[in-house]
Amino acid sequence: MTKEEDIKTKQKRDSERIASLTLMDDVFMSKVFEDKQCVEVLLQAILDKKDLTVVNVEVQRSIASLQGRSVRLDILAHDSTGKKYNIEVQNSNSGATPKRARYNSSMLDANITDSGDKYEDLAETYVIFITAQDYFHAGKAVYHIERIVTETKRQFGDKSHIIYVNASTQEDTELGRIMHDFHCTQVKDFQTETLANRVKYFKETESGKRRLSGMLEEMRAESREEGRAEGRKEGREEEKRKIAKNLISAKIPMDTIQETSGLSKEILIALEKELKEEQGKPAKCAAN
């Protein structure tokens, strides 16, 4: 295939991919919701607050913990009253577990405070999961999770909120129409003008398509790099296993091998068993 043919093939593939994208694709959703007006319309519908004003939006924001583990937020938004919103699209229920919501909420708190800040000054936060399926199987469009004092049945009042939006319920409400739009591939089927205009830019204008194509190329490059990194990691692990087997064969104590190799005791036991099996096999006759 010539370079020109390769370019045309990529362009055709990108064009087909762009045509099939919906707002349930988190990367496309992130591009669309870079626009503050789009986030504003969505939050107003979810929270039923027409006066909510979004003042800042960040997409695909990575937040790292002190332990080095990081989380990438689809959308992080701030409103005019100082409230913080993390919005996530989850096509699989496995990505929308209660502990995932708890983790995101804790990361928001840890990263919006500075040393010396008073606890009373903590911002009110919302973690919002838009799920493709009804996570709680109760037929509701929205589920609000709040901490409750068990004995009094009153709200704890820590200003930390978790909301699940069921995207499979598309009622004749503003939120229902937006959830309908989240599943549309074609602009003509959208019912929310603000979202339709933004999606139209990416799907039907040359500049928008170029931006999406660039995004898709970045994703492919990132995927290739992750594959190479994984390959390097696998290569290093394989080398460590080979060295460990040699040390086992040399009768080096298991504790010493574990300490020097970093391999778990279970892996070393399996390698020892593997080595014994190899040593017990009869030698094969070399071909003449």
Image (cartoon, rainbow, N blue to C red):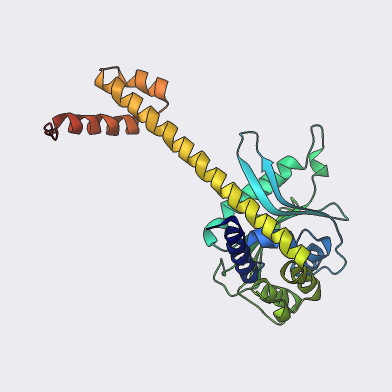
Residue 137 x %, y %: 54, 71
In this rendering, position of residue 209 left or right of residue 263: right
| Residue nearest the observer in this picture, 269 or 144 | 269
| Residue nearest the observer in this picture, 143 or 40 | 40
Q: Is residue 112 visible in the rendered structure shown here?
A: yes
| Residue nearest the observer in this picture, 133 or 21 | 21
Q: Residue at x 82, y 68 (%)?
A: 49
Residue 4 x %, y %: 61, 59
In this rendering, position of residue 229 left or right of residue 86: left
The answer to which image quadrant residue 199 occupies is bottom right
| Residue nearest the observer in this picture, 269 or 23 | 23
Image quarter where the C terminus lies is: top left
Q: Residue at x 61, y 69 (%)?
A: 16
Residue 78 x %, y %: 81, 53
Q: Residue furthest bottom?
A: 172
Q: Residue at x 88, y 56 (%)?
A: 80
Q: Is residue 146 visible in the rendered structure shown here?
A: no
